[in-house]
Amino acid sequence: MVKHKVYCCLPKLFLCFCVSLLFIGCKSNIEPNTIIPFPQSVSYTGKTFETKVGSQFYTNLSGKEKDDLSEYLKASPLALQSTDAASSARISFDIVSTIGDTLTVDGGYSMSISNKNIKVEATSSAGIFYAVQSLLQLANIQDNGLVTFPTVDVVDYPRFEYRGMHLDVSRHFYSKEFIKKQLDAMARYKLNYFHWHLTDGAGWRLQIDRYPELTQKGAFRPYKTWKEWWKADRHYCDENDENAEGGYYTKDDVKEIVEYARQRHITVIPEIEMPAHSEEVTAIYPELSCTGIPYTTAEFCIGKEATFEFLQNVLLETIDMFPTEYIHIGGDEANKNTWKACKACQKRMKDEGLKDVDELQSYLIHRMQEFLQSQNKKMIGWDEILEGGLAPNSIVMSWRGEEGGIKAVQQGHEVIMTPGGYCYFDSYQDAPINEPEAIGGYTTLAKVYSYNPVPEEVKDKAHLIKGVQANLWTEYIPTPEHAEYMLYPRILALSEIAWTNPSNKSWDRFHEKALKEVDWLQANGYNTFDLKNEVGAREGSETPIDHLARGKKVIYNSAYSSQYPAGGDSALVDGYCGDWMYNDNRWQGFVKKYVDVVIDLGEVTPIKSIKTEFMQLAGPWLWMPTEVVYSVSMDGENFTELTKIETQTSPEYELLAFETYQWEGESEARYISVYAKRNEEKTGWLFLDEIIVR
Ligand code: ACM
Ligand code: ZN
């Protein structure tokens, strides 16, 4: 069935007439507005262009660029064939010096599909490639080889120059074929940087000829999953060991992947972690650590010159493999205490006049930046590289929120935004009680879509925000299917916030198209999250619940934590329940305390039910109360116990759990006391959201 969207007001009869004509004249079942990321300007003109799989196209590109395009189109579902006879091809892709005198942004293109031909113009081969992606998304290919497109005029260009996807291949190793498959999807959504997290404590994944043991030993462990390895001895093993799990990419693999990416206008940025997240290196080369003893520290010793020699040698081979102008040196999450206890590090600090360990880390980062610059490379690092002073010409990836990014922009540095709350796809994407175990956090498709990578604070320096990136850390993602499940469809939202101008964003349109795109992804072998059956927000977290205690006064006999106050004194009776995560500003947290609160209903009121819900999550030490006691009082001094409810949730249960503690009966009260005892054997938190009285 054809659906038509009518955007203007016309007299009803005339409208019916037009719609009938459209139904008769239209052979395709394509709906308008079906491109992700949504173009800057798109106008559908209501007709259809028809062609066949295997049709001819013409391009004025030449040499390698022409070969790349021809190969890509030939292998695409349209199977287009290149011809040199411009006049005989109804489909053309041409490089021009400017488009309508305006469109010169790299990657920009114009595409006009009439009922007679398809005409693409761009100022770069990247622009032509992105037009091809739009075309592929618009194509309706039938089993008999007939292809139809809606007629449309598109003028399009990216909002950000950097549109990235990151993949951690250390915590779990993924095959070369898997990487290529993800590069295919990146291309479809016009993403252009693949940030390859190749080294970390759980395994070194890059062949380095000078240090063969990095991969012979550091790429394997006698445990299949990161979790098993993490809970056990965190040791590595020889690649030939019977139980060896893991793997690495050879130089030939890297060459193949880099070339595959290049053909899709994707740049591969390697990340070599330093000075932390390097347990696999210090286990094999303990002389590079402060202790000199394997399996004792994740940090390189910054006092020893051997560290610099090693890192520079590794970087030289890395640079040889990756033609990109960018190298990522990590820089995150160092345990700087290691350096406080090290003689060599202390001597370095003294010799270089470094006042603290932040400056010591910054010393290493500065040296690495100088080294990379001497190799004509630009350095990227996680936002910790700001600590102790940011090296010149370095690019900051802001992951601990936006603060690092804002600070770096204010210092005149370029920034890539990857704030955890929006861009970390290792978090839950739907109700965590139904999802496979994730590291934590709760980032729905809608949340990713809501993100604007230019913070208000630096709006006037927006040109320094190079772009935005999604990160997939894989501690809890042991299989390639699971990795795809976490990426899709969230990467679609990332692509739209990276490409589309905010004024053109529409959640409803995006969501509708994303549902179809999920079907396409599944039909093409991707294991996606089941978007059409998304559970969504927890009941009561979006629309308030009306009940007798709502808006009434709460007397706190024990204080909530200032870290998790939710809405403060009114949080437990504001009508809103919490969503799926404790840090959503609706759940109120009590640390190392009982919950002891009294609600003043204002007058004696008949009551039939009291209900509270608590949350348990072992990771951040949230536990169920051992029991919850409800009591009532007329004067606020003499209380009568209504019930004492013991918990049903085992403290051994590690995943997210919710438990409702409910009393039902007949009573009267002006004051209601809620008293929840904490588990004395478990240091940590009690979290509750709403006390619902009926
Ligand atoms: C990071 O997530 N440690 C950059
Ligand atoms: Zn040291």
Image (cartoon, rainbow, N blue to C red):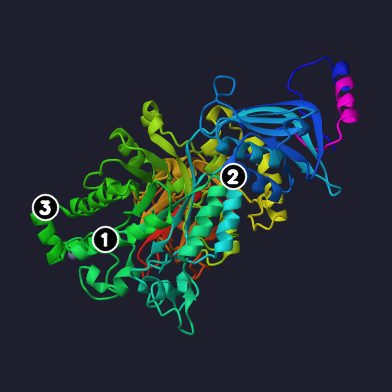
Give the amino acid at mark 2.
Leu
Measured Cα–Cα span from mark 1 to mark 3: 21 Å
Task: Please tell me how crowded label 2 is: few (under 14), some (14-19), or many (20+) other residues with Cα within 10 Å.
Answer: many
Up-down: is 330 above or below 250?
A: above
Q: Which of marks 1 and 2 is in front?
A: 2
Q: Earlier in the sequence, mark 1 or mark 3?
A: 1
What range is drawn magenta here? 17-31
> Residue at the location (57% across, 52% down)?
183
The residue beneath circle 2 is 492
The residue beneath circle 3 is 352
Up-down: is 212 above or below 135?
A: below
The answer to whether mark 1 and mark 3 are in CB contact below 8 A is no
Label 3 residue SS: helix
Up-down: is 582 above or below 477?
A: above
Task: Please tell me how crowded label 1 is: few (under 14), some (14-19), or many (20+) other residues with Cα within 10 Å.
Answer: some
Residue farthest to the bottom?
242
Label 1 residue SS: loop
Image location of residue 226, percent across then percent down: 46, 70
Label 2 within 8 A of ligand 1 by Cβ: no
The residue beneath circle 1 is 335
Give the amino acid at mark 1.
Asn
